[in-house]
Image (cartoon, helix red, strand yellow):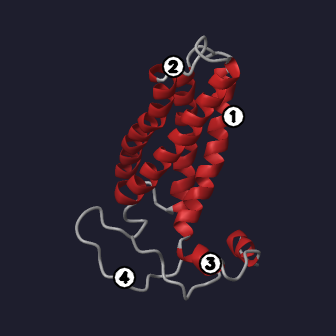
Amino acid sequence: MPSPTQRALARVPDRLRPFLVRHRRLVKFLLVGSGCFALTTVVNFELKFTVLEHKPVVALTVATVIGTVVSYVLNRRWAFRADGRQREALMFVLVSAVAIGVNDVPLVVSRYLLDLREPYVGAFQQEIADFLSGMVVGTFVAMVFRYWAMRRWVFAQAAGTAPAGPLPAPTAAPVEPGYAAPEMPRDVP
C-alpha cells in the first residue's frame, strides 16, 4: 500500500514531481509552517479579541509560542525526522525564542513607531496593519530565520549537515522510505 506521501506525489504534475522530491524537506517544513500559521492566526485573534484586547503584542507572542511548540513536534517527527536528543530541544528553544522576537518586531514597529493604532487610525485599519505586520511580515521573516537555524543548529545531523565547517562534496544519500523517486538526490545545503 502506498504511503500518504506517495499518494500525494502521484497527484502532482510530472514536471513538478522531481523538484518536490529533491526539496522534500523544505516542502515538509512549509507544510508544517502553513498549518502552524493557521493555528497561530486563530489563537492570536481569539486572544486579541477576548482576554488580551489591549495587548496585541502579548497576544501574538502567546499565539506564536503555541504554534512553535506544535511546529517543533511536527518538524522533529516528520520534516527533519530527528530522534529528539536533549541538545536538539535546547537549541530549538533558543532558536524559537529568537524567532518569536523576530516575529514580534514588525508588529511593534507598526503599532508603536508608525502609530497604526486607535485613535490615530480606525479600528479596521488597525486590524489590517496588525495582521499584515505581525502575522504576514513577522511570520515570513521568522520562517526564513527558523528554516536556516533549524537546518544549521537544531536538526543538523538529521538534515545531513554538519553543525560547522566546510560543506562536504555532494554524494548520493541513502533514500528515505516512502518516496516515489529514489533516484533523485537529496537536497544539499
Asked whether disc 2 touches disc 3, contact meaning CB atoms under 8 Å apart, the reply is: no
Q: Position of residue 41 (x, y in %)?
A: 65, 36
Could you tell me residue 92's position as x and y percent?
Answer: 41, 47
Asked if marks 2 and 1 touch (Cβ < 8 Å), the reply is no
Q: Which residue is mark 2?
A: 115
Which residue is label 3 attached to?
A: 179
Tell me the kind of residue under disc 4: Pro
Image spot of residue 44 (x, y percent): 63, 29
Amino acid type at image mark 3:
Tyr
Give neighbour class at mark 4: few <14, some 14-19, many 20+ (Cα, 10 Å): few
What's the distance in space between the residues labelled 2 and 3, CA to CA? 50 Å
- The residues bearing labels 4 and 2 have C-alpha atoms spaced at a distance of 50 Å
Residue tagged by mark 1? 42
Q: Secondary structure at mark 1?
A: helix
Q: Is residue 158 above or below residue 93?
A: below
- Calculate the distance from the C-alpha at mark 1 to the C-alpha at mark 4: 42 Å
